[in-house]
Image (tube, rainbow, N blue to C red):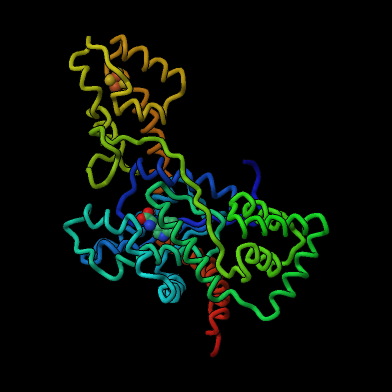
């Protein structure tokens, strides 16, 4: 993809869980950093989400919030192009969550896979709370408030975007009525021009009668590609494809992040809960020490034993950090016992240290001036609220609740 894409909005959030590590960076953050130059991006600290599983001990919450924002900035998120904010400073998230809760069937939430999975995984927490059950709906509110086209997330969050789409559809179905809709939509169809309006009608018919997803996509892109439509007509035409309403809330799409496998020091996936991480801003000595003692192919007990990179977590990091010449050198040297593991790790250590040093350098300014970070978040919050308020106005209006 090249150049900025007009009118394409992206939104994503991250729970503040303490210092971010290389797994978080390569698994999500790096992708955000690329997206910020291609889309209008909104990224937020999901501090209310942190409460859904960690409501008892909130002593560290604030420090986690600020340190995560510094990690973001250190890694290269640019507040000049992306809007960075903290969820709880934009109370519109809570209002939309409440309104959506009125129309969301309990069964939808109970069936979200993470509901049962997390209760098993976090067995030491009491997760039989209202907030925990409702957390995917809070996420739906987070998303729908900004009407993004895309939500970049990992595999584990796809079901949450899916329920968001269902909630949007249900909302539009219930509240997406407008006086004189039929006439307005007719006029809007005609304004597409004779060829496109015939195409639009045919695709809509095909979707409505056969449920053909391809026809739905074609009809939508026909509308979306038309730059001359007013926003209201565009919404009418999009809504009309699926029913007779207007879409007040727009259905987002998942932008599945293709992520490399980031192995932790013990060979398991890098994760805070395994204690096998390398921090995004960890000091050089500690990074070097950790990598030097990182698990390798267990078959290489002695220097003279040949190894298999496929069985070595260090190789997973080489795939991320090393160029193809180095990778070939690793493959050959490992399989032939031509190089030792420490030798193999040396170029990797160099790259990781270089990257982390850059992050630390960028972070320094923010660590020394917490006011700078607060300013960025305050400004991001204002920008986010402008968008959020517009959506809520529309929502209240469509629900007959814009009285004062
Ligand atoms: N639930 C996400 C997670 O645990 C974080 C999140 C909250 C989020 N709201 C969001 C992600 C909205 C994308 C969009 O990782
Ligand atoms: Fe792993 Fe490299 Fe040792 Fe092979 S030589 S086992 S790839 S660290």
The residue at 47%/66% (across/down) is 167
Q: Is residue 190 visible?
A: yes
Which residue is painted at 72% across and 59% down in the image? Answer: 201
Quadrant showing the C terminus: bottom right
**Quadrant housing residue 177:** bottom right
Q: Residue at x 58, y 74 (%)?
A: 176
Residue 398, above or below 370: below
Provide residue 390's location: percent of width, then percent of height: 57, 73
**Residue 38 at what x, y percent from top left?**
59, 48
Q: Foreground: 394 or 346?
A: 394
Return the residue nearer the eye: 238 or 134: 238
Specify the quadrant of the image occupied by residue 289. top left
Q: Is residue 375 visible?
A: no
Q: Quadrant of ligand 1?
A: bottom left
Q: How many marks do you count on the picture?
A: 0
- Position of the N terminus, as image quadrant, is top right
Left/right placement of residue 10 relative to residue 19 reads right
Image-quadrant location for residue 314: top left
Rendered view: 280 above or below 106: above
Q: In the displayed image of the protein, which residue is found farthest to the front?
A: 209
| Residue 30 position in % (x across, y down) | 46, 43
The answer to whether 108 appears left or right of 291 in the picture is right
């Amino acid at each position: 993809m090249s150049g900025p894409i007009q009118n394409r909005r992206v939104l994503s959030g991250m729970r503040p869980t303490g210092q971010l590590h290389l797994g978080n960076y390569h698994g999500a953050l790096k992708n955000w950093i690329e997206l910020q130059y291609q889309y209008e991006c909104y990224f937020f600290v999901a501090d209310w989400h942190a409460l859904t599983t960690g409501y008892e001990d909130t002593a560290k919450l604030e420090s986690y919030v600020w340190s995560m924002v510094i990690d973001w900035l250190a890694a290269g998120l640019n507040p000049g192009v992306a809007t960075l904010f903290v969820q709880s400073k934009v109370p519109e998230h809570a209002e939309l969550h409440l309104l959506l809760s009125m129309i969301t069937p309990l069964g939808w939430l109970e069936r979200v896979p993470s509901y049962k999975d997390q209760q098993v995984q976090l067995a030491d927490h009491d997760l039989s709370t209202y907030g925990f059950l409702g957390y995917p709906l809070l996420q739906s509110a987070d998303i729908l408030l900004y009407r993004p086209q895309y939500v970049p997330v990992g595999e584990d969050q796809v079901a949450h975007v899916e329920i968001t789409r269902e909630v949007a559809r249900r909302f539009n179905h219930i509240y997406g009525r407008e006086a004189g809709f039929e006439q307005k939509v007719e006029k809007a169809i005609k304004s597409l021009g004779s060829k496109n309006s015939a195409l639009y009608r045919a695709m809509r018919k095909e979707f409505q009668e056969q449920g053909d997803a391809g026809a739905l996509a074609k009809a939508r892109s026909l509308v979306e590609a038309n730059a001359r439509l007013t926003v209201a007509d565009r919404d009418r035409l999009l809504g009309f494809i699926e029913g007779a309403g207007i879409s007040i809330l727009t259905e987002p799409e998942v932008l599945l992040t293709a992520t490399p496998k980031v192995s932790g020091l013990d060979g398991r996936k890098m994760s805070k809960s395994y204690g096998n991480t390398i921090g995004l801003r960890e000091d050089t000595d500690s990074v070097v020490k950790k990598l030097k003692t990182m698990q390798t192919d267990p078959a290489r007990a002695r220097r003279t034993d040949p190894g298999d990179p496929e069985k070595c977590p260090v190789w997973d990091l080489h795939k991320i950090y090393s160029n193809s010449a180095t990778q070939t050198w690793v493959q050959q040297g490992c399989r032939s016992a031509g190089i030792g593991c420490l030798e193999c790790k040396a170029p990797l250590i160099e790259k990781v240290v270089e990257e982390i040093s850059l992050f630390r350098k960028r972070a320094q300014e923010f660590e020394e001036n917490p006011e700078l970070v607060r300013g960025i978040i305050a400004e991001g919050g204002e920008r986010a609220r402008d968008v959020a308020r517009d959506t809520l106005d529309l929502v209240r209006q469509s629900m007959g609740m814009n009285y004062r």
